[in-house]
């Protein structure tokens, strides 16, 4: 059995306090299997992980887990046990290699400190109609940010990024459809129509085809996860409380993505 890492050190190393509910669940399963050395994880293991690492157990813990189990790419349920899919293993491996090694690309603080410069929508390959919409949204995002309205910033950044990536995908369908990260129908294995792609898939494919860099993909978790809380009931169920820190990261990711999309 592998040596158990001190709870405080583990929580600090993997920045658990800033992870989404989905990612926390993945880390709980990972910790149980790869750190504690068990063959699989149970709901009790996940709950113990939360408590041991100083994380609040969600009020609707069972309901959240049931929702996560509906995501076949994220985890696998076998009877009452949980194991990681290859997708989840790759996500954790990528996260750890980027964030927590001596050769990491950059820390969150360093990423937020990157100078974006003046955003020029004219450098993006957009239809005239979409260009106007993007320009208006950037103005509105800035106003919401200055007014300390984090939820509005998160939603606007997420939907704007989705629109930009989808626009590129529609211009280059053959390229994005060949990507390994392209979402597929679970029954047929056929790549889904572009209009059915979620933001998470658009981001994963954008990273794979080098449309955006690793840092922007890595820190886009704030955008891809929290944008889903546009539905009030889901936000209430998850107990999500937006902060300006999350809004700042979402805005930085959007701006960096825009710069990296110039001319593509």
Image (cartoon, grey):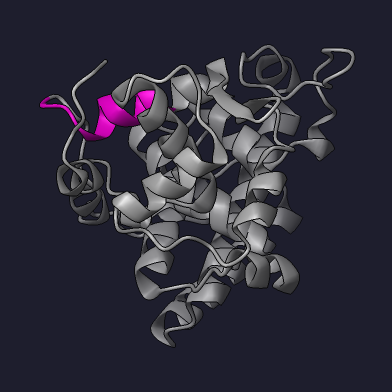
Residue that protrudes farthest toward the right in the picture: 188
Asked if residue 184 lies left or right of residue 263, the reply is: right
Asked if residue 123 lies left or right of residue 201, the reply is: left
Q: Is residue 81 above or below residue 49?
A: above
Q: Position of residue 250 (x, y in %)?
A: 44, 58
Q: Identify the residue shown where x is 43% and y is 67%.
A: 247
Query: Can residue 119 be seen in this snapshot?
Result: no
Q: Is residue 211 covered in magenta?
A: no
Q: Is residue 220 above or below residue 102?
A: below
State the extent of the magenta-drawn residues as a range.
92-102
Asked if residue 9 lies left or right of residue 174, the reply is: left
Counting labels gives 0
Q: Quadrant of residue 248?
A: bottom left
In the picture, which quadrant includes the N terminus? top left
Q: Identify the residue shown where x is 63% and y is 15%.
A: 179
Q: Is residue 100 covered in magenta?
A: yes
Q: Quadrant of residue 249?
A: bottom left
Q: Identify the residue shown where x is 71% and y is 46%.
A: 66
Residue that protrudes farthest toward the left in the picture: 102
Q: Position of residue 87 (x, y in %)?
A: 55, 21
Nearer to the camera, 122 or 228 = 228
Nearer to the camera, 81 or 176 = 81
Q: Predominant secondary structure in magenta? A: helix
Query: Can residue 89 be seen in this snapshot?
Result: yes
Nearer to the camera, 264 or 222 = 222
In the picture, which quadrant includes the C terminus? top right
Residue that protrudes farthest toward the bottom in the picture: 147
Q: Is residue 164 above or below residue 91?
A: below
Q: Position of residue 161 (x, y in %)?
A: 58, 50
Q: Position of residue 260 (x, y in %)?
A: 42, 38
């Amino acid at each position: 059995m592998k040596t158990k890492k001190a709870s405080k050190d583990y929580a600090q190393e993997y920045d658990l306090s800033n992870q989404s509910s989905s990612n926390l669940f993945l880390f709980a399963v990972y910790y149980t299997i790869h750190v504690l050395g068990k063959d699989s994880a149970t709901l009790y293991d996940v709950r113990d992980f939360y408590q041991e690492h100083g994380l609040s157990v969600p009020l609707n813990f069972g309901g959240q887990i049931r929702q996560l189990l509906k995501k076949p790419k994220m985890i696998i349920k076998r009877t009452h046990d949980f194991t990681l899919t290859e997708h989840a293993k790759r996500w954790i491996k990528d996260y750890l290699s980027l964030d927590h090694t001596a050769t990491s690309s950059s820390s969150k603080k360093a990423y937020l400190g990157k100078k974006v410069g003046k955003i020029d929508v004219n450098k993006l390959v957009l239809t005239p109609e979409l260009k106007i919409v993007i320009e208006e949204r950037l103005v509105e995002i800035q106003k919401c940010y200055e007014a300390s309205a984090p939820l509005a910033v998160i939603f606007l950044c997420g939907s704007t990024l989705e629109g930009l990536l989808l626009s590129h995908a529609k211009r280059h369908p053959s390229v994005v459809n060949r990507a390994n990260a392209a979402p597929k129908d679970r029954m047929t294995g056929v790549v889904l129509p572009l209009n059915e792609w979620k933001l998470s898939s658009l981001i994963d494919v954008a990273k794979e085809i080098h449309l955006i860099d690793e840092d922007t993909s890595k820190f886009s978790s704030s955008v891809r996860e929290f944008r889903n809380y546009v539905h009030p009931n889901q936000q209430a169920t998850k107990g999500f409380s937006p902060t300006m820190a999350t809004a700042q990261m979402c805005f930085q990711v959007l701006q960096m993505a825009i710069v990296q999309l110039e001319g593509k």
